[in-house]
Image (cartoon, rainbow, N blue to C red):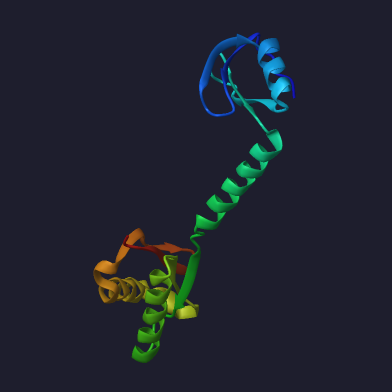
């Protein structure tokens, strides 16, 4: 790619600043040393160029992006489904699963599915979700309070950091 500016701020291969020079001069200096003239900050006035080995520069950039990608954590949304008339053991088992997901730094969507005539007892759903919040205590942040969406009721929980 071609450097379009007439003058550039030149940085030497050892990192010292040479100053503002015409592009042709900067290119000839780079050619003398057997290196490339690389535009590092094109949006600056005047653009910043550095004398360096372009292949090595590309390699280091690729390595940096690879390391940044490794450090990145993906937050997933896990879902745990309840029923309005759930037994105590099943409830405790599912709450343990919610805790496990929150410990893994995932968000958890807790849903209650209503079938048939159960739809008339939505207050049971609100009580159940309130009980889930109570069981988890101060380990969580309720991102979305319990609300009805068709025949399901849901809320979104996130781990406290």
Of residues 80 and 12, the one nearer the viewer is 12
Q: How many marks do you count on the picture?
A: 0
From what the image shows, is residue 61 above or below residue 76? above
Residue sitting at x 53%, y 18%: 44
**Left or right for 128, reference 18:** left
Q: Position of residue 93 (x, y in %)?
A: 39, 86
Q: Position of residue 19 (x, y in %)?
A: 53, 13
Image coords of residue 107 (percent x, y): 43, 64
In this rendering, would 118 be left or right of 70? Answer: left
Q: Is residue 45 left or right of residue 139?
A: right
Q: Tell me the residue at 33%/61% (across/down).
A: 142
Dividing the image into 4 quarters, which one contains the C terminus? bottom left
Q: Quadrant of the N terminus?
A: top right
- Can residue 40 be seen here? The reply is yes
Q: Quick check: can you spot residue 113? A: no
Quadrant of res 82: bottom left
Q: Nearer the viewer, residue 60 or 18?
A: 18
Looking at the rendering, which quadrant does residue 84 occupy? Answer: bottom left
* Residue 46, quarter of picture: top right
Considering every residue shown, the one lying at the far front of the view is 33
Q: Residue at x 42, y 65 (%)?
A: 105
């Amino acid at each position: 790619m071609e450097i379009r500016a007439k003058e550039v701020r030149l940085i030497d291969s050892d990192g010292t600043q040479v100053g503002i020079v015409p592009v042709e001069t900067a290119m000839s200096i780079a050619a003398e040393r057997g290196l490339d003239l690389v535009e590092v900050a094109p949006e600056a006035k005047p653009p910043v160029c550095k004398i360096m080995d372009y292949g090595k520069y590309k390699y280091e950039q690729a390595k940096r992006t690879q390391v940044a990608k490794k450090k990145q954590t993906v937050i997933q949304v896990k879902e745990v489904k309840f029923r309005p008339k759930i037994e105590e053991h099943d409830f405790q088992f599912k709450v343990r699963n919610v805790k496990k997901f929150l410990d893994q730094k995932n968000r958890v969507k807790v849903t209650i599915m209503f079938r048939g005539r159960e739809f008339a007892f939505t207050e049971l759903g609100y009580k159940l979700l309130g009980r889930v919040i109570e069981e988890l205590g101060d380990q969580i942040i309720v991102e979305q309070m319990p609300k009805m969406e068709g025949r399901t009721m849901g809320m979104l929980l996130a781990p406290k950091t």
